[in-house]
Amino acid sequence: MPRTFFPIAPLLALTLAVAVAADTVWLQDDVSYKGKVVSEADGEVLLNPYNSTMKEMVWGLKRFDRSVVAKLEITPEDPLRKYWFDSSEPKADHVALMKFCRANGLEVEAREEALEVLDADIGNAEARAGLGASVNEIIAASPRHNPGLREATKDWAALGATERRERYAKLKKDFGVTLPIQYFDRVARSERHAAGVVTEDIHLTYNSQRASGVYTVWLPKNYNPHRAYPMVLALHGTWNGLGGIGEGHTFVKHFTYAETKKWDVIVVAPTADPRPWTAKGDTYVLSVIDEACLQYNIDMNRIYVTGHSMGGGGTWHFGTKYPEKFAAFAPAAAAGSGNELDAAAQGTGMYIYHSSDDPSAPVARDPLAAKRLRDADADFVYTEWTDQQHGWPQAVIADSFLYFRRHHRMNKGPKGPEPIHGTRPSFAEPLWPDEERYFPATRAPGRPGELEDLLAEVALGGTIAKAAADRLLELRNPAAVKPLIAVLRDLRADCHEARFQAARALGAVPSVAASSALLGAIEDPSWKVRRAAAEALATAAGAEESPWLALAVHRLGHEFDALAARWIRDETWAELHAFNAALVATFAAWGDPAAWTVVDEICIRRILLTEAKSGSDNIDPEPVRRASAVRILGALPALDAPSAKEAVDAIRKRLDSPEVKAAADDAEKKIGG
């Protein structure tokens, strides 16, 4: 459940020791055991020393005949943890929760619940009394509670920077607004995102000059940017468990099942490219978290991280290295980091899962981590199944989410971890470094200086660069060519997203300079930039450049041979075939029959129709080739080659599938003869 926050001033972080619930079994000989009592049925007591309540968890389980048990101490749940869990229900009874908080001395939470009550019943006398004499001022300054304030800011996204400052001054005067001006900037950005759906492969914009990549987001259907929501960062493995390459947009499907929908949580799933998660250092993942907090109203006291396999390794890494950022983390099918006690000292919760028969990531280190956490009286759960190999059951994902709901971010206190009370909405935070640079206010098309602004935004990379490149494609301004070439030739590793968008934009202006730069980019270190350059050449140049592009194809053939002789990474396999298809499409756009030989011998027979070692046993490489084949088949008729039908028939026979057959039949009809 999202939380209401006070619009009049930031809440002070109050601290109070919060107990980790542990049951105790006392035997007749005065020996005791701690853990979680999971059953008292059939004359015996079952205790899990590692706090898992799942029936499939049998490792370390202790069984006691009821006759030898002197007493059971079942520790009641701490009121604050109970509140955290109960308040996360989408249909929580906020009147009852308000009363519960008051009865248990949870003053900050009681005030937040009063605001929840007023959201549904603005006249509720008990809730108004709980907010004190300033209740009317609180409501007036709250965009969530005051429809007049929402009306006054509904056109915020269309305002320029100067207009926003003027409007903000009026909001302070008319409504007593104390939220910072950037709150309304963030809300305006956030309102563009569709709720209740998965948005795939969003290009990272924030900090994109130091990090690059894409991420996928699942927003709950009731998402409201005036409320703060918990967030789960989901890190995929080498493969996604659904028959394909590990990527954020496929991995997120693990979290759109029933338990996720019972909890109004935002799921953010980045894609690791290259692998593993630490291949580019930590900046990429940390920048994804920052951008999520700037695009969606995240409760920064309720950020969690989970992942499977390679993603479980990433979860161990980030969870133990930055425990102050997370309320809890849940690695699955990965080896314990050895630094789990650092996270325990912070009070960050840990839910660890593994299957004892895992052939890919041996289980041994996780039980050792669980023992160290048990001995330290840490807040953790270790769940071990016996028959899932390298899998990750939905029941375990659901159980880890139930664990998350009982956890908020903690402070490291002098006597141990202390809870941070209240909600910390990311939209009410001070300006992030460079926030206005990466997310500028709306600017009118055709304004003075627009071209310079667009070129600067292309150089930033990310979503802002894509929007700028789209606009440059519309403008077709020759003055953009030279600056875009400069971006395209910046070969720093973290600038490939900017180079990709620069290549796209250069396709708008046919010129010798643009075509020369794009031909050079055909050998860019990034396959993605190569593909964009090939596609842009279709409009930036013509058949006069065909011999030079043919030379690039010959070099690609040699590069493919070298890769195919050993092993091709999954991401490289996909991007290489996409690039190969783009080359054929460009030759076709130029309508140059002289290119047929290189297309037939290298692009089709040497690359498309060659089976290479790609991926792992869990990944089928053929969908990549089939997608490339469909695009190539669509381009062949324009090359007007006498032997094109033979190539079509070879593709149909080698890559037999309904989509390839349909594309081959269509190509044959267009070729005729």
Image (cartoon, grey):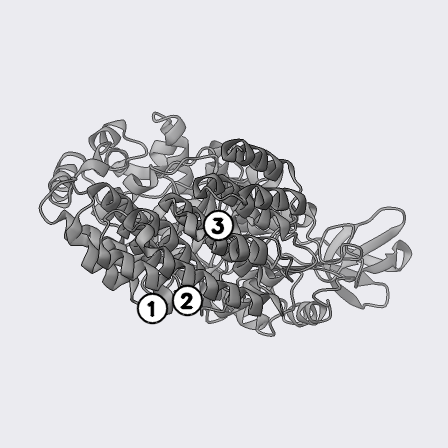
Check disc 2 and give the amino acid type: Pro
Q: Dot 1, crowdedness within 10 Å: few (<14), some or many (≥20)?
A: some
Q: Dot 2, crowdedness within 10 Å: few (<14), some or many (≥20)?
A: few
Check disc 1 and give the amino acid type: Leu
Give the SS element for disc 1: loop
On residue 122, the disc is none
Q: Which residue is mark 1?
A: 491
- Between marks 2 and 1, how big is the CA–CA gap? 8 Å
Q: Which residue is mark 2?
A: 525
Check disc 3 and give the amino acid type: Ala
**One can see residue 665 in this view:** yes
- Between marks 3 and 2, how big is the CA–CA gap? 18 Å
Q: Residue at x 42, y 51 (%)?
A: 594
Say above or below: 327 vs 131: below
Give the SS element for disc 2: loop
- Between marks 3 and 1, how big is the CA–CA gap? 24 Å
Q: Position of residue 179 (x, y in %)?
A: 24, 45
Furthest toward the left, the residue is: 448
Quadrant where the C terminus sits is top right
The reply to whether the C-beta atoms of the residues labelled 2 and 1 are less than 8 Å apart is yes
Q: Nearer the viewer, residue 615 or 405?
A: 615
Q: Position of residue 621 (x, y in %)?
A: 63, 53
Q: Residue at x 15, y 53 (%)?
A: 479
Q: Which residue is mark 3?
A: 581
| Sequence-earlier tag: 3 or 2 | 2
Q: Residue at x 43, y 52 (%)?
A: 595
| Sequence-earlier tag: 3 or 1 | 1
